[in-house]
Image (cartoon, coloured by chain):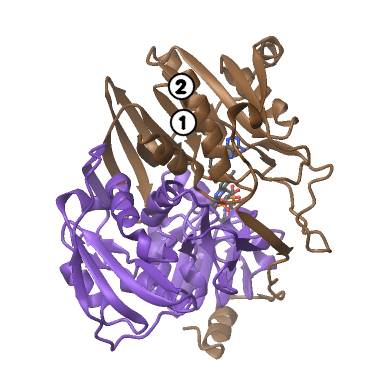
Chain colours: A brown, B purple
Amino acid sequence: MKVLVPVKRVIDYNVKVRVKADGSGVDLANVKMSMNPFDEIAVEEAIRLKEAGKADEVVAVSIGVKQAQETLRTALAMGADRAILVVAADDVNTDIEPLAVAKILAKIVEEEQPGLVIAGKQAIDNDMNATGQMLSALLGWSQGTFASKLDIDGDHALITREVDGGLQTIKVTMPTIVTVDLRLNEPRYASLPNIMKAKKKPLDEKTAEDYGVDVTPRLEIVKTTEPETRKAGEIVGSVDELVAKLKEAGAV
Amino acid sequence: MAVLLLAEVTGGELAMDATAKTVTAAVKLGDVTALCAGASAAAAGEAAAKIEGVSKVLVAEDESLGHRLAESTAALIVSLAGDYDHIVAPATTDAKNVLPRVAALLDVMVISDVSGVVDADTFERPVYAGNAVQTVKSKDAKKVISIRTSTFDAAGEGSAAPIDTVSAADNPGLSEWVEDKVAESDRPELTSAGVVVSGGRGVGSEDDFKLIEQLADKLGAAVGASRAAVDSGYAPNDWQVGQTGKVVAPDLYVAVGISGAIQHLAGMKDSKIIVAINKDEEAPIFQVADYGLVADLFTAVPELIEKL
Ligand SMILES: Cc1cc2nc3c(=O)[nH]c(=O)nc-3n(C[C@H](O)[C@H](O)[C@H](O)COP(=O)(O)OP(=O)(O)OC[C@H]3O[C@@H](n4cnc5c(N)ncnc54)[C@H](O)[C@@H]3O)c2cc1C
Ligand SMILES: Nc1ncnc2c1ncn2[C@@H]1O[C@H](COP(=O)(O)O)[C@@H](O)[C@H]1O
């Protein structure tokens, strides 16, 4: 079975995001970019399936600017076998919407015929939480979102999902699309020799036009602003003082 | 404009708080029809009919709609979508599972976690873990939207909207429910509680997390946790507050042994009063706390429980 893993290049989760003063977006110039943390978990899961003999090839895909090559090299260094880069924008400030990403991924699925797609649950830049579900709809496949456990057994998979009430386990028909949550696994770091090896692994470059997908956004970003900030509070000296303050504020 | 609102129905019951808050956002868009779907949903339909602002209720009962499986629920919504301009739902894990699927089937973009309705096409939503707020204008013919309930007040009750039944769409039969692991608790539900007490990695163990629960019980509060506390097994996953967990905005939020990473703040910084207890005076949580106490939690929390 082939496993397809879509990975997104996003601002590193440790970077303090700055909103541009003119409201045109956030500052992405000269900031550290990394693989979306959920996608690291997705890549890890795919590699573990291969190591367990349940998958024979792991293909990483990224859609966006040319620089997403680096993200794919990271996936290859972790253990993916090959990668596909779909260049769909020139400007690093252009975010390709989940609907367009899902349409391109659907074309790639047609070509590559994977038995499983493992995506992240959410990209930490746009916080959409949509692509996996959309891809599943376009393909007419089953979906198992927010997975914290994945067990593949022939033509079915058991997926445990992190939901508001706790955990839900479902049984889905293969092929399926899984989106991963934080507790599925702990992704490995790529070792130096593997980083070197990854440079020689195949990385195909395509464009959105190659797949005939129109990536024009459906949502026009009118403006991007700073959220309201909280005013600094006070440090209290003791538990007694804290209790007094809370009573004064009517909070207890 | 006509709005189809997917009510939050769990185990046949209506989640009133999440649904009523979503109604407040939805009435700004047009005439609201609430859809209650489930293996049993009639009781939920009756409850939804009481929410002020709901002008009609649709009840869809079918085995295939139990446990809110995405494929069958999305198929039902798509079968009804023709009559509506907007399809909205609270941004719960159920709706986040279903709505993007609906949107793709309708060939429109989903708009997740809407925190403000500007007009029928224009919405505000937090991005980058709440570090920025985007205003987006949809060019799609239909809008599929999930609502961040923590930013809307619940609509009142007292109406009596008419109730109709609709039938489920064909079940694509791609998935089936196996089991739920739900912890029973007498505590208030995290996203609707007036007071939340959360513990972080500083609490140190699952056993010591009981201290957080005792403080919560003293305050009649719900219990939350940081990702680190959940990852370490001190607390269950459904307690996680933050960018990728639950978003809460209670009157009082007490953060104990939590450093205040941006991903955590994303889920609680709209709380009315924030209290932080942390032994590190440099912890970023103090930058958003109204009242900060620099102390070891193992002495401060027992003392607090005693003195409240
Ligand atoms: C993709 C992604 C998504 C994420 N989503 C979330 C999310 O939704 N929610 C979330 O919370 N995090 C999330 N995180 C994780 C986040 O970045 C932080 O790692 C996490 O919030 C830290 O948890 P913490 O504050 O409990 O632990 P730490 O940062 O380790 O802080 C522990 C604190 O406890 C204090 N402490 C220790 N001992 C004591 C004591 N005896 N008394 C008093 N204080 C003490 C320490 O001074 C310290 O400040 C996410 C991260 C990523 C990459
Ligand atoms: N441009 C992209 N390229 C590759 N994968 C993507 C892209 N956008 C989203 N994804 C995948 O979809 C997941 C969810 O993203 P989103 O729906 O944007 O929150 C991510 O974790 C990735 O696995």
Q: Which mark is residue A118?
A: 1
**Mark 2, other Cα within 10 Å: few <14 / some 14–19 / many ≥20:** many
> For the residues tagged 2 and 1, is the chain the same?
yes
Element type at marker 1?
strand
The answer to whether B282 is drawn above or below residue A51 in the figure is: below
The answer to whether A232 is drawn above or below residue B233 in the figure is: below
- Asked if residue B229 shows in the view, the reply is yes
Q: Is residue A162 left or right of residue B14?
A: right
- Asked if residue B216 shows in the view, the reply is no
Residue located beneath label 2 in the image: A3
Instruction: Name the residue located 63 percent from the left edge and 62 percent from the top edge.
Output: B136
Instruction: Quadrant for residue B261, please give it.
Output: bottom right
Q: Which chain carries label 1?
A: A
Instruction: Name the residue located 57 percent from the left edge and 51 percent from the top edge.
Output: A127
The answer to whether A186 is drawn above or below residue A192 in the figure is: below
Dots 2, 1 in contact, CB < 8 A: yes
Q: Which chain carries label 2?
A: A
B223 or B303, nearer to the observer: B223
> Identity of the amino acid at label 2?
Val
